[in-house]
Amino acid sequence: MLPRGRPRALGAVTLLLLLLLLVGFFLFGRDPEYGLRAAATLDGDLYGSRNRSAASLQPLLPPKCELLHVAIVCAGYNSSREVITLVKSLLFYRKNPLHLHLVTDAIARNILETLFRTWMVPAVVIRFYDAEELKPLISWIPNKHYSGLYGLMKLVLPSILPLSLARVIVLDTDVTFSSDIAELWALFAHFSGVILLWLDRLRQTGWEQMWKLIAKQELLTLMATSLADQDVFNAVIKEHPELVHPLPCVWNVQLSDHTLAERCYLEAADLKVIHWNSPKKLRVKNKHAEFFRNLHLTFLGYDGKLLRRELFGCPNQLPPGAEQLQQALAQLDEEEPCFEFRQQQLSVHRVHITFLPHQPPPPRPHDVTLVAQLSMDRLQMLEALCRHWPGPMSLALYLTDAEAQQFLHFVETSPVLSARKDVAYHIVYREGPLYPVNQLRNVALAQALTPYVFLSDIDFLPAYSLYDYLRASIEQLELGSQRKAALVVPAFETLHYRLSFPNSKAELLTLLDAGSLYTFRYHEWPQGHAPTDYARWREAKAPYHVQWAADYEPYVVVPRDCPRYDPRFVGFGWNKVAHIIELDAQEYELLVLPEAFSIHLPHAPSLDISRFRSSPTYRHCLQTLKEEFHQDLSRRYGAAALKYLTALQQSQSRA
């Protein structure tokens, strides 16, 4: 069913057979009279048949192991989010293996490759096609639709999909299924053998030549398409109505102001596919609007990990790495005291990078990205952080699917956050009982685009001048190829929820002397930052070198290609310590910056720190992880790693 208007103009539910577009849908062309006549020839009157064809077509479902092919055109950040909700609805109802053919731009491909690789859904094959390569095939068509060239790309799908592919269902990104897609696939059976033979001859003649010729004829009077590919489809079918096979309108119930969706069905539960082809999206007016919204919102917030279920009775089509993961999980002993830690280390989290539109900073040789991670309970700290750090940020958020939608609303309604396009947000979906702090850091670190990164935490506010100061310091110290160093940013904390934030080092020292500030964790974990040598920092005018010591965990600025965090450390404890050890083992020089500072804000303790403080088993497991970490250090660095084990043992004996 071709829609009258589409917010993405990436197509309605369309069938392709033997690489020839068979468009089974209602036509709403630019000529209203033509649109009505076309609709009447396809499926009774305009949504007036109450879907009579649905009753007459009772398709026999395909064998449960038959591979169903689906093609989607997806470009940009927002469209990438939309397609995930569509895929969730597909996976929820499906009983067949799926092969998704995704035509994407570079942005969408980067996002979706990461997402599907980490989603690890069985019996789903993904293939990408470069939309950039298709643009020359359609760029000659003047198009006024805001989707641009992407709205025309379905015209060339028969040219780019594999020649061996006989059938494919083409979906728009803004549709939601409420039934098994196999029912739609089964409608191919109603294409008679005569039609198939005719299509074979038509393929030999060439679909590409057909639509191009007709499009050129139409453009003599139309001047430009206003509905993207729909205008071309309308023109082709006007000349070749024999191409059209009617689909029951329940397979594309369109929710825009220009359709009469309620005439398509008797009961809302009869619907198969809902198409949000209106800029209003969930705000459209319809007598069953609440039903439509609830269905869509259900999949929007549905826990994607529940869709990792295998298709029983079909050949085991596991995604890469899934079999090894299953074997590793099966070997875990649930009675072992540290089972939760082992399980969390093996968890594969779905990752949706650049969840919101993002404008990368222009390349600059000494630029710095602030890297941090957070969960829903720290969301309120984002606005203050944006005020303090004007540079790029890469933030990993540990959220459920439902929380991700709350976060989206939070950003869109915040004047501060919505104005910042240089902040990249990466959703890591919840999986397992413990907080995967270092996995989150690694996701954010991997997505940083500047040469240097400031490895911070979300509950720290940097000095207002820190971004500019760090860039100047990197240049002056000739870091990079000239010098391998980690720049230490001294950390402080306040116990007051309201603080007059210092504008300079002098103001900070005044607050420190007055007891309004402390060096970070001075009362609870002094060894964590003692090597920074705060007494020396007070008087320092130039960067100074400090030595690594046991349990040292400063916040540092390092090159983007620095060692990653050790993901075995989950929950609370030693996650930054292990990273600093790795930097020292790789001979990073530790340099403290004399004018840099960052201040920790007070907040309620996390669940993991509470468990650490109250559970001897938790602390025992952390100690086990430390010992295993040191064993791995010895394997990688040999005798040079002995000093870390010795320092750890001395630290434990003093404690």
Image (cartoon, grey):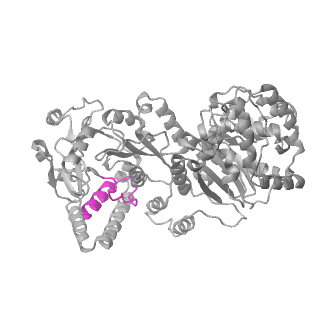
Q: Residue furthest left?
A: 539
Is 644 situated left or right of 619 in this image?
left
Report the front residue among 215 and 381: 215
Is 450 situated left or right of 193 in this image?
left
> Residues in magenta?
559-586
User: Which residue is at 38% across, 62% downward?
Assistant: 621
Where does the C terminus fall, quadrant-wise?
bottom left
Indicate whether 483 appears above or below 260. below
Q: From the top left corner, tell me how far across and down residue 250 is, in percent.
A: 79, 39
User: Which residue is at 25% across, 68% downward?
Assistant: 645
Indicate whether 378 appears above or below 619. above
Is 280 situated left or right of 621 in this image?
right
User: Is residue 518 within the magenta segment?
Assistant: no
Is 311 situated left or right of 378 in this image?
right
User: Which residue is at 67% across, 42% downward?
Assistant: 172
Q: From the top left corner, tell me how far across and down residue 313 is, in percent.
A: 73, 65
Indicate whether 652 appears above or below 595. below
> Would residue 232 be visible to someone looking at this image?
no
